[in-house]
Image (cartoon, rainbow, N blue to C red):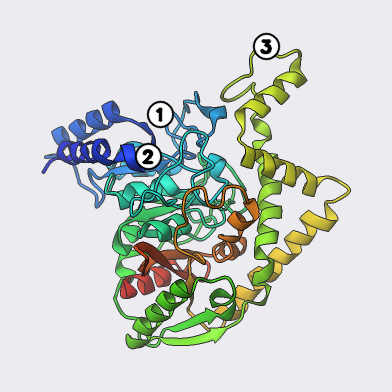
Amino acid sequence: ITVSDLVDESYKRIAAVDGKVKAFLTLDEENARTSAKALDEQSGSLEKGLLYGLPIGIKDNIVTEGLRTTCASQFLSNYNPIYDATVVTKLKSAQTVTIGKLNMDEFAMGGSNENSGFHATHNPWNLDYVPGGSSGGSAAAVAAGEVYFSLGSDTGGSIRQPAAYCGIVGMKPTYGLVSRFGLVAFASSLDQIGPLTKNVEDSAYLLQAITGHDAMDSTSLNADIPDYVSALTGDVKGLRIAVPKEYLGQGIDPKVKDAVLTALKVLEGQGAIVEEVSLPHSEYAVATYYLLASSEASSNLARFDGVRYGVRSENPKNLLDLYIKSRSEGFGDEVKRRIMLGTYALSSGYYDAYYLKAQKVRTLIKQDFEQVFENYDVIIGPTAPTPAFRMGSQTDNPLTMYLNDILTIPVNLAGIPAISVPCGFADGLPIGLQIIGKALDESTVLRVAHAYE
Ligand code: GLN
């Protein structure tokens, strides 16, 4: 089998299913076929890496040189980056082939893909349901077999929640492990790029390919990178698992709870020790996150002024009018809501009451995790309180939408790694098990996920 065959299969599958799933915003067929051909022609002389020739998809907030990158915003509908994100450069040197750019909630704000400025993506398991978000296109494309794996970004759950809803594996690495250079910033202190794959082994391979220190990202860690694949020993004997009581309490769908308890039994059967713990500040996580993430977003999105990037409003009266019109026309409702919320929280009269207070609670949430990790190797709970929901069922209430993130957000606030792996179904829709680890202990997270899987 040649790389051209693989790429061909990928586009055939897209032609067959993407009219319904709608995972892609932009396809890069000509270039993909050219790179596939080039790899095939050099095949004899090339030293082939583990990801050699695999067709992949990239979330559309990760910049790709010469390939339209929109963040699913009308504002950037004409934006062609002049450089590649570090992760894209790394995957190119790993000899993968980029098939196209994947749909998302606009600027990664959302959990259903319904906030895309172009079109919604559908859940491949049931087209009437959302694929989750914001990396919904990345999850749906893998689940529907359109690409081998994809990259997403996770600020408050945007890799793990869509992975859970689409029945695949999604990992958010430790903050700073993967370079954010070329990731269009949503909330810089929370954003991380990570892999969406069909299984845990692929997740380990892909993570290995994208990690590493990058001088172009000032928050990039200079840490030793272990061999993630060799961590997949299948052995969890004596491993200590903490189950936070807050993660299986109020608001958790009983079918999700049952699936998680069954998964914990499986791990117990393999010799792990399972005990209940408490993360007492969990209840404040959603409020803390939406203040901090929106504050950072309001600042990060100031660069979209109609002058430097994307679409410029026509016939403005003056410079101020150009800013106002371009932003009013370019951004969707949810993005505007976050900018207003964040600007308010950062304004001088409210800074102490909201932004500063939220920073302090963030520290308490981080300390909750640190205390549990003094005695345990991993923390396990559901990825999301429910399976995927029906399209349109939550669009008129942003608060219920925000509550879907209650189990993923604390992990971003603490900067630690977590993975979502499939752990069963409810009414034909997948359920995700979330495994959370210590900072930079991706190996243990992957080991437990792999042993369970
Ligand atoms: N659903 C969350 C939000 O809307 C998380 C988004 C993300 O992780 N990018 O902010």
Of residues 203 and 406, the one drawn nearer to the viewer in this rendering:
406
SS state under label 1: loop
Lower position in the chain sequence, tag 3 or tag 1 = 1
Instruction: Identify whether 269 is placed above or below 253.
Output: below
Q: Locate residue 268 relative to residue 408 in the image: left or right.
A: left
Image quadrant assignment for residue 388? bottom left
Alpha-carbon distance for marks 3 and 1? Answer: 28 Å
Of residues 265 and 357, the one drawn nearer to the viewer in this rendering:
265
Within-10-Å neighbours for mark 2: few <14, some 14–19, many 20+: many
Looking at the picture, which amino acid does disc 1 mark? Leu
Residue at mark 3: 315
Ligand 1 within 8 Å, label 2 CB: no
Q: Position of residue 374 (x, y in %)?
A: 57, 82
Looking at the picture, which amino acid does disc 2 mark? Lys
Numbered circles on residues, count: 3
On-image quarter of the C terminus: bottom left
Q: Residue at x 23, y 30 (%)?
A: 33
Alpha-carbon distance for marks 2 and 3? Answer: 34 Å
Lower position in the chain sequence, tag 2 or tag 3 = 2
Q: Locate residue 156 relative to residue 103 in the image: left or right.
A: right
* Of labels 2 and 3, the one closer to you: 2
Residue at mark 2: 22
Q: Residue at x 31, y 39 (%)?
A: 18
